[in-house]
Image: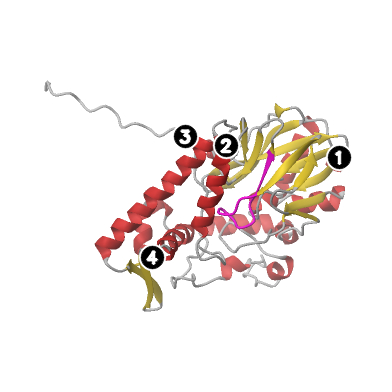
Amino acid sequence: MSGEPQAGPAPTRPPRQEREPAGTDITETAPGVLRTQLPVNLPGIGHVNCYLLEDERGVAVVDPGLPTPASFTALEQRLRAAGYAIGDVHTAVITHSHFDHFGGAERLRVLAGAEILTHESFRPVWEATEVAEPAELLGAGEDDEGAHRPPWMALSVNPWGTKREPMPEKEWRAWKEIARDDPRWFATPRPTRTVVDAQIVRLARREWICLHTPGHTEDHLCLFDPTHGLMLSGDHVLPTITPHISGLTPHADPLARFFDSLERMGAIEGVTTVLPAHGHPFEDLAGRAKAIRRHHEQRLNVVRSTAEELGTGTVPQYMQRLFSERSWGNMAESETFAHLEHLRVLGELAATGRGGQTVFSPA
């Protein structure tokens, strides 16, 4: 045997908390604030944290899960375990317009008369994890088995000129099975109460400060309870993964908006417990916000070096440097485009058209 030291096994990355399957426990994270989980079977996500805010009127539900019968049944079970029925829900709080967060809200409105509370800018943004308004959904076309196809599946070309990849057959079949129950539940709910940045709302016998935190979506809403130091962070700040930043927005630089929102999070004093929409509660909000910022700064450096190497490149060419092959596709292209646009706005890159696609090169 050689006397040379032998290389040990490659270090393994800690498992991503957000991928863990939903548990059934009900945990009190603070007086009157209960954490439970609803099942979510999406790429990279195994659950959504559903927070129950108790008060004299009953309970408010934060992020009531997917628009599926199985998810709503799980919500009923969690409520029952906490001593409540569907009729006790007076408010559904939605942190942002992704369907694993708003899916149960419309059912709660219909069955319990619950208010639907969102930021005033709440709306669908057509990404592969988002859904349609009722008329659009029901009029978007049908396949040969009669299942309605939502508009984001009919989009054929991305704004940067690449052909949009169809949904994988396995995911499409899962969609059909879900939508067959009643496609109306996939419609983005109509808020009955909207809030603006810095507005105060009273839930769980305490006052929460509403914080508009655009980036992951334009309408993202966090809630901060300064008395107990609680921050309901939605998908804006997650414990072990970084939220997707979409290039499909009306804003020229969504990444800059995300950076601004992260900086704001890091400056808030008195946060002792962060309650994210996926993964476990954690304490260091400022540290995690800085870590997410560093992640994107590293990606920007990869884009810079790729631009120098390629001279001129398409969005897919940059995407292949930013993401591993298993992640290539519509969402990876979208996030790549957001990073390219950020550097374009800063004046570091120039964008032109070539062969029907947007190409980027050093300015």
Percent x, y for residue 4? 13, 24
Task: Kindly report the distance in space between the C-alpha atoms of the residues bearing marks 2 and 3.
Answer: 11 Å
Q: Quadrant of the N terminus?
A: top left
Q: Residue at x 78, y 54 (%)?
A: 106
Looking at the image, residue 26 lies above or below residue 350: above
**Which secondary structure lies at badge 1?**
helix
Of labels 3 and 1, earlier in sequence is 3
The residue where tag 2 is placed is 279
Cβ atoms under marks 1 and 4 closer than 8 Å: no
Q: Nearer the viewer, mark 2 or mark 3?
A: 2
Of labels 1 and 4, earlier in sequence is 1
The residue where tag 3 is placed is 15
Percent x, y for residue 299? 38, 51
The residue where tag 1 is placed is 88
Q: Quadrant of the C terminus?
A: bottom left
Task: Kindly report the distance in space between the C-alpha atoms of the residues bearing marks 1 and 4.
Answer: 54 Å
Q: Main secondary structure of the magenta part?
A: loop
The label shown at residue 203 is: none
Q: Where are the magenta residues, as a range? A: 212-224
Of labels 2 and 3, earlier in sequence is 3
Q: Nearer the viewer, mark 1 or mark 4?
A: 4
Percent x, y for residue 214? 59, 54
Tell me if mark 3 has few (under 14), some (14-19) or many (20+) residues whose alpha carbon lies within 10 angstroms of its own.
few
Q: Quadrant of residue 86?
A: top right
**Which secondary structure lies at badge 2?**
loop
**Which secondary structure lies at badge 4?**
loop
Cβ atoms under marks 1 and 2 closer than 8 Å: no
The residue where tag 4 is placed is 347
Q: Residue at x 66, y 32 (%)?
A: 229
Of labels 2 and 4, earlier in sequence is 2
Task: Kindly report the distance in space between the C-alpha atoms of the residues bearing marks 2 and 4.
Answer: 37 Å
